[in-house]
Every structure is written in structure tokens, then in C-alpha cells.
Image (cartoon, grey):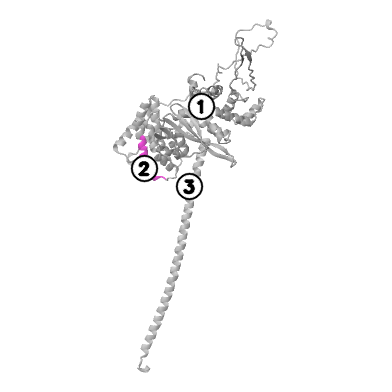
Amino acid sequence: MPESSIEPSLVSRLLLDRDAEYRRANAAEQLVEELSDARVLKEKYERLISEKKRDIEEKRRIIEEKNEYILRLEQKLLYLERKMWGAMSEKRRVPDDPNQLRLDFEKTDMSEEEANTVRKALEEIDRYRSTRTAKAREKRIPVRLKLPAELRHVEEHVYPEGYIGHEDEWILFSDTETSEHLELQPAELYVRVTIRHKGIRKADKLIRTAPVQDEPIAKSYASASLLTDLMVGKYVDHLPFYRQIQMFKRLGFSIPAATIEGWFHDVADLMRPAYFRLKELVLASDYVQSDETTVPIINSEKHRTVKGYLWLVRDVMNGLVFFFYNEGTRSAKVVLQLFKDFHGAIQTDGYPGYGILEKLEGIITICCWAHCRRYFDRALYNDKARAEYALAQIGIVYDVEDMADSQEMDHEQRCGLRKRLAYPVIRAFEKWCITEYPKVLPKSPIGKAINYFLTYSRQLARYTIDGRYKPDSNLIENSVRPVALGRKNYLFCGNHDAAEDAAVIYSLMGCCKVAGVDFKKWTLHFLNHIHEYDNDYTKDLAELLPHNLKELKLL
């Protein structure tokens, strides 16, 4: 077709269509480019948002850690403030509120029969509380104490002025005015010289010499009285040896420190056989309490003091106690070493090392309610409502003990009362703890308190199965106090051997304390008679223990 025959309008339309197609293609390319840029930008922003989220989470984690750290510091500060200036007895912090005796049974998983049992127990305890009369505390008025009659009295006569030398000019009345004053005579060091005479008997013509007296330490000038004073000074009065050396200097004689250290080890060696016999007697019983306390030990290799542990075992029924030291370790192997041959009940705190006792045949473990109460007492500032409720429930447990004490129940009666009143309350308290634990922070003071109770609830309830068992181990903690006072004064033991010697002396001193025997009188008697048991194996070293000497009225 000739070009002249093509209509101009068709060409124009074709050109317009081509131009439009070109613009569409160009727009599509721009759109593709923009979409590509948008995708890159979106990824960029998503990456920035993700980084921001991570930063926020990290900052939130840091804030939570700091808040927890601040909370721990606040708790430590409150504890230290109370320890320095407040009352440490958590018993005084139990609120005397009758409402605290009530338990919301609807919030606990208890059957109607269990709830009725608890209600009856609480009603009986509430009646006891209402009838219990508090003893009125008499106001203490300072009075001048009468001086003991058993002390030596020295009379001093004072006459009117001008009487001396002119007695014939005076007439003295029979009435006199008397006053008493307590005098102190300073200690005195003196030398006891023993002279052994010898002679010949006329009848048999045999020459005889006076027998050698047994001294506590052979070939030593230290007498029993001097050694006793040294031991009492360090372990009763908590005076380090270097202070006692200064005291001896003021009395006129200087004793080298090395000599006194040697005497200390010799005295501990003399007491060690009696200590082993004491240990046998304690572990032969069927109910003991065990605890451990720290004692600083000098580590010669590290040239500093390290923390060591003294273990303490107490025969509750007979009042015998011994300390045990095994190179300062607190590991479970010491528990096995101590109680591998023991059969009976062992009452402890919540230290996990005692957990191995649950696996030993013939042993049951009992936990201490005082330690459990202490956890809730520390949580008062964290969650007052829950902590006060828990302290009130633990107070009910001790009210049952007060009921038994006031009625002077024997062991069998006390056991029956515990099963009837205390055990239902303990189980109700356990169900309350199970209900409340998910509502609190596990690491908070109240969370730790509830978790402690739930962990040891079985061991805490076991004291109800025997009237002899105590609800807590406060008795053994009282025996630890001399160690705590001693380490504040003489600061440390020189080595592991010195710590073992200290355990021996602390053991026998603890027996004196429980038996009500003066440790000074006992030590003096022991040192004067210990060598009587050297060769006579028919004698039992238990005869020299404080409670036996007291029964024989030798102390």
C-alpha cells in the first residue's frame, strides 16, 4: 500500500500508543525501583527496630538486676540495723492478733474433715490463750545486795579517837556500828617446792623415798592450778594467751609464748581420751542435735586466715555435747564420718549437707522450727501480711508446747497433745504455703521463706511423733555461743591442730555448762586425777566427766 494511502490519523494513534506504552514502561521501571528501595528501607527499619527492642530488653534486664540488687542491699541493711540496735528474737515479733488464728479454708485444698479438725484445734488453742495469764513483771528497784556469808570475813576494829593507849580511861559500849565492804586480793604467783624425804625403816632395814607426785605435765614447772587458770582465761573469759602473758608479767614472772602454747597442746592431749569417751556416749544415744559454726584458721601457705567449721553434736536427753573438727571442712563427708554408726533421730537446721542422712538406714531427720520462723521474720519488710500470718501459725505450734509445759505433761502425753493440736495446724499451714507460693516472687524474702518451709515440711512435722523431741534446736545453739565469743576476742586458731585441741576443750567446757559445774573446779580436779587412769584399765574415763563428778558430789 502506498504511503499516501495511510491515513494520518492512524499514524498519530500509533505514535500516541507507543508514547503511552513508553511512559507506562518508564513508570513501571520507576515503580520497581521505588519498591526495591522501599524493601531495602523496610529491612533497614526492621533491623533498627529489632536493635532497639534488644536494647530495651537489655536495659530492662539491667534495671531488674539493679532493682534486685537494691532490694538485697535494703534487706541486708535492715538486717544489720536490727542486729546492731534492734531485738533479734523473732518470738517477740509474732503479732498477738486473734484474727491471725483464722484460716481461709476456701482458698486451701482441704477436705471438710481436715478443716473441722483444724478448727477444733484452733478453738482449743484460742481458749488456752484467753485463759493464760501473763505474769506481771515487777519493777526492779536497785537494792544493795547482801554479801555472801561463805566468803572469808576479816574484821577491822576502829576505836574512838584517843582510845588507843588510854584504854583505862574509857568504857566501851557493847553496841557497835558495823559496815561491810567487798575487798579483792590480787592473784599471786608463788613457787611450790616439793621436797621428797627418804629414810630407813628400822624393822626391815629398807631405804624408802617419798613417792613422786604426779604432775599434769611431766618435766614441766606448770602446776594444775596454773594450767587451769590459763584454760579458763582463754575459753571462759576469752582472753588470748598474749594478754595472759602480760597479766603474768604484772605478777612478777614472764612466761614465753611458745611455752604456753606447748602447755595448751599438752592439756588438750590429756583431755583427749576423755573427749573420745564423751563422743562415744553422745553417739550411743538415739536422739541428738547437730549444728556447725565458723572458726578462723591461719593458712600458712596463703598467709591469711581462712574460714573453718567446728561441728557440734548434742545428746538432748542426757545433756552431753561434743565439738568435732575435721580440717575445717563443711562437706557432707563429715556428716557421714560423724553419723555412719548412729541410729536414731538427728535434729538439724536446713544445711543441705545433712540431706545425705535421709538415705542412711536407721536414721530419721528432724528440722528446726526456729530456723523456719527466722526466714519469715526476715520477710516482714517484704510482705508483712503473709509474713505475719506465717509467724502467727508458727506461734500456735509453740503455744501447744506452752500448754504441755504448763500442765507438766510427760513425753507420752506431750506426744498425744502434739498429734491432736499441732499436727493439724502444721498441715493446714503447709496447704496455705502451697496456695500462696505461686503468687510471690521465688527470690523475694517471703518466697524464700515459703520455699524453705515447703522443702523441709516433712522434717519439721516429725517432732510430733515423739514427746522427747524438741520443736527447735535452740539448746545446741546456746552451746555454740562460747565459740562465737571466743573468735571475737582471740580472733583465730593458729592451725588445724590448734583447732582440734580447741574442739576438745570446748566439748568438756560445754558439758560443764550443761551440768551446772564450774569449769575451773572441774579442770583442776581433772588435771590432778587424770594420771590415776594411766595404768588402771578397769577404770572408766567417763567417771571424770562433769555430770558424773557432780553426781558423786566431788564438785
User: Who is closer to the viewer here, 483 or 220?
Assistant: 220
Residue type, label 1: Ala
Query: If you read the primary sequence from the N terminus, does the residue marked by circle 2 or circle 1 appear first?
Result: 1
Residue position for label 1: 274
Q: Is residue 535 magenta?
A: no
Please report the bounds of the magenta region as a residue range.
425-440
* Label 3 Cα crowd, 10 Å radius (few <14 / some 14-19 / many 20+): some
Residue position for label 2: 435
Query: If you read the primary sequence from the N terminus, does the residue marked by circle 3 or circle 1 appear first?
Result: 3
C-alpha gap between disc 3 and disc 1: 52 Å
Describe the element under mark 3 as helix, strand or loop.
Answer: helix
C-alpha gap between disc 2 and disc 1: 52 Å
The x and y percentages for residue 282 are: 45, 29
C-alpha gap between disc 3 and disc 2: 24 Å
Residue 201 lies in quadrant: top right
Query: If you read the primary sequence from the N terminus, does the residue marked by circle 3 or circle 2 appear first?
Result: 3
Residue position for label 3: 68
Residue 185 lies in quadrant: top right
